[in-house]
Image (cartoon, grey):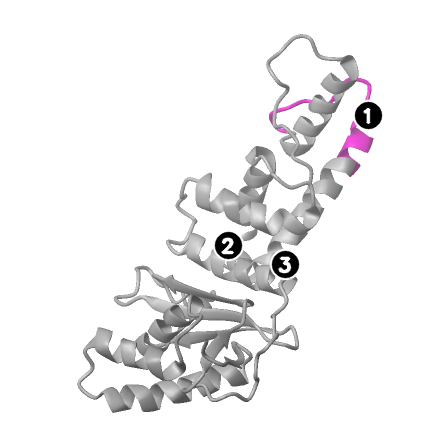
């Protein structure tokens, strides 16, 4: 999607053909506010108006299917039209429309009465699936033992994982479940892409969330060392339970390709 200006730039020395281009794109973005260039019949302009808007709207509704279902047709098209008319895209590619729409929601759209309180978090969660599905990142399995001992060696986290703390249970939201206030406790979610390129998610408890946080920047410590640190940080009354449960979590993460395996400590 090209970064079309919403109005003609305020300067006078502009070539005639550029003036027509600005008028043309401004009209396509917001036909109610900007008239079409002279000498172009409306029948032809209508084709362009419909084609471009439908393409953008289809990309957005496909990228944010749950969010789409939460709006009636009038409010949904009003929001997409506002994005189309006012947002200045940084990318010329249609594949980046979803990222541009997320930017619009997070940084430009003032909350309206029809917008759910969890709008930005839900949109972010839905966009992460697209981001991981299309990511060019590939796991580096150099010197990684897929069957290595997760407690004695260094667990290797896949780069195709994203860990977030949300204020709302965004993975459960639907037309039939729309929370009116934030959760009393953070909602920890892991979004990942496995080695078969399938995107999935996991809701994490505090122990698993803390473990993932430690794994993200770990290059030297074994699984046991990490769990010892967690038990100490949490001041857990039963460290052995942390080790037992933590080892099971590590194994589960490996079955989902969130952990690629292990490396031998340096």
Answer yes or no: is residue 69 visible.
no
Q: Name the residue under label 2.
A: 71
> Where residue 46 appears, x then y in whole percent?
76, 35
Q: Residue at x 72, y 41 (%)?
A: 52
Q: Which of marks 2 and 3 is nearer the N terminus?
A: 3
Q: In this view, does 161 lie above or below 84?
A: below
Q: Residue at x 53, y 61 (%)?
A: 128
Q: Do the residues labelled 2 and 3 touch (CB within 8 Å)?
A: no
Q: Is residue 88 above or below residue 231?
A: above
Q: Is the magenta stretch mostly helix, strand or loop?
A: loop
**Secondary structure of the residue carrying numbered label 1:** loop
> Where residue 228 appears, x then y in whole percent?
29, 81
For disc 1, the neighbor class at 10 Å (few under 14, some 14 to 19, many from 20) is few
- Residue at the outermost front position: 266
Q: Name the residue under label 1.
A: 41
Magenta stretch, residue numbers: 32-47
Q: Mark 3 points at which residue?
A: 62
Q: Which residue is drawn at 32% across and 78% down?
A: 207
Answer yes or no: is residue 44 visible.
yes
Q: Which of marks 2 and 1 is nearer the N terminus?
A: 1
- Residue at the outermost top position: 12
Q: In this view, does 104 lie above or below 169?
A: above
The residue closer to the viewer here, 50 or 193, is 193
For disc 2, the neighbor class at 10 Å (few under 14, some 14 to 19, many from 20) is some
Label 3, label 1: how far apart the Cα atoms are: 32 Å
Q: Is residue 78 above or below residue 182?
A: above
> Where residue 255 appears, x then y in whole percent?
53, 85
């Amino acid at each position: 999607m090209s970064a079309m200006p919403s109005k003609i730039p305020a300067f006078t020395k502009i070539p005639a053909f550029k003036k027509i281009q600005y008028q043309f794109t401004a009209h396509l973005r917001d036909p109610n506010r900007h008239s079409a260039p002279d000498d172009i019949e409306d029948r032809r302009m209508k084709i362009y108006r419909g084609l471009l808007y439908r393409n953008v709207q289809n990309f957005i509704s496909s990228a944010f299917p749950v969010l789409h279902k939460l709006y009636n047709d009038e409010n949904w098209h009003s929001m997409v039209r506002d994005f189309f008319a006012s947002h200045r895209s940084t990318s010329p590619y249609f594949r980046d429309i979803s990222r541009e729409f997320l930017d619009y929601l997070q940084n430009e759209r003032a909350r309206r009465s029809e917008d759910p309180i969890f709008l930005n978090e839900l949109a972010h969660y839905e966009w992460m699936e697209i981001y991981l599905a299309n990511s060019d990142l590939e796991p580096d399995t150099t010197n990684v033992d897929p069957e290595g001992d997760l407690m004695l060696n260094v667990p290797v986290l896949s780069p195709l994982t994203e860990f977030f703390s949300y204020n709302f249970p965004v993975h459960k939201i639907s037309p039939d479940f729309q929370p009116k206030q934030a959760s009393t406790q953070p909602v920890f979610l892991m979004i990942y892409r496995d080695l078969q390129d399938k995107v999935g998610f996991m809701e994490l408890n505090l122990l698993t969330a803390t473990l993932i946080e430690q794994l993200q920047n770990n290059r030297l410590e074994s699984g046991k060392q990490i769990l010892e640190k967690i038990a100490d940080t949490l001041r857990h009354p039963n460290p052995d339970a942390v080790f037992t449960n933590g080892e099971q979590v590590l194994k589960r993460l490996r079955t989902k390709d969130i952990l690629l395996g292990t490396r031998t400590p340096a």
